[in-house]
Image (cartoon, helix red, strand yellow):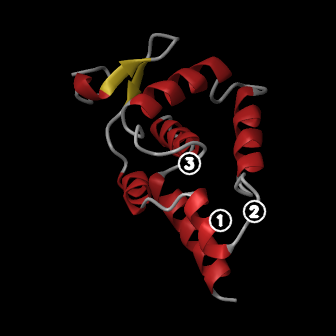
Amino acid sequence: MSTSGKNDSHAAQNQSGQGVDESPIALLEAVRARGRVWSDLTAQYGVTNPDPPWKVTLEATCDVLAEGACALPVLERRSEEDQLSETVYAGVPFPERQLLALAHSMIRRGLFKEEELERRMKQVHERLTSA
């Protein structure tokens, strides 16, 4: 067992020497399993922009997390992203893989709860489908 109480088989080391908790997060596993990626949506809706509209927000979130009190220092985030991308989210294309890895790290670090993300995702879905 690791110090977090998780099985060591789920913990990899980030650059600071702390373990990356690779244990599944149900909500993120459900998103991964659905397999809806930007390239599918562009084909379905005839969108020509190769980058998803949320990519800029993802990059800005990463930058903000590394500022000030360093809620998620850039080198640790990149190390965790690399580790999670090679293991948990290996079959997911970029940038969706980056998004899932960031959400995974933020949930495991307690920056927000899985339930909060799920609630927000439902709100966005309702907004998009109510039109």
Q: Residues within 10 Å of mark 3 (few under 14, many from 20)?
A: many
First in sequence: mark 3 vs mark 1? 1
Which picture quadrant has residue 54? bottom right
Horizontal and vertical percent for residue 104? Answer: 48, 41
Q: Nearer the viewer, residue 31 or 27?
A: 31
**Looking at the image, is mark 3 or mark 1 nearer the viewer?**
1
Horizontal and vertical percent for residue 70? Answer: 69, 25
Q: Secondary structure at mark 1?
A: helix
The residue identified by callout 2 is 48
Q: Can you tell which mark lies on residue 96?
A: 3
User: Which residue is pictured at 55% across the width and 63% down the height?
Assistant: 40
Q: Is residue 99 left or right of residue 118?
A: right
Whether pointer 2 and pointer 1 mark residues with C-beta atoms closer than 8 Å, the reply is: yes
User: Which residue is pictured at 36% across the width and 32% down the height?
Assistant: 87
Horizontal and vertical percent for residue 45? Answer: 66, 74
User: Which residue is pictured at 27% across the width and 30% down the height?
Assistant: 6
Which picture quadrant has residue 126? bottom right
Disc 2 to disc 3, C-alpha distance = 18 Å
Horizontal and vertical percent for residue 51? Answer: 72, 51
User: Which residue is pictured at 57% across the width and 42% down the height?
Assistant: 94
Which picture quadrant has residue 89? top left
Q: Nearer the viewer, residue 25 or 56?
A: 56
Q: Secondary structure at mark 2?
A: loop
Residue type at tag 2: Thr
Q: Is residue 108 visible?
A: yes
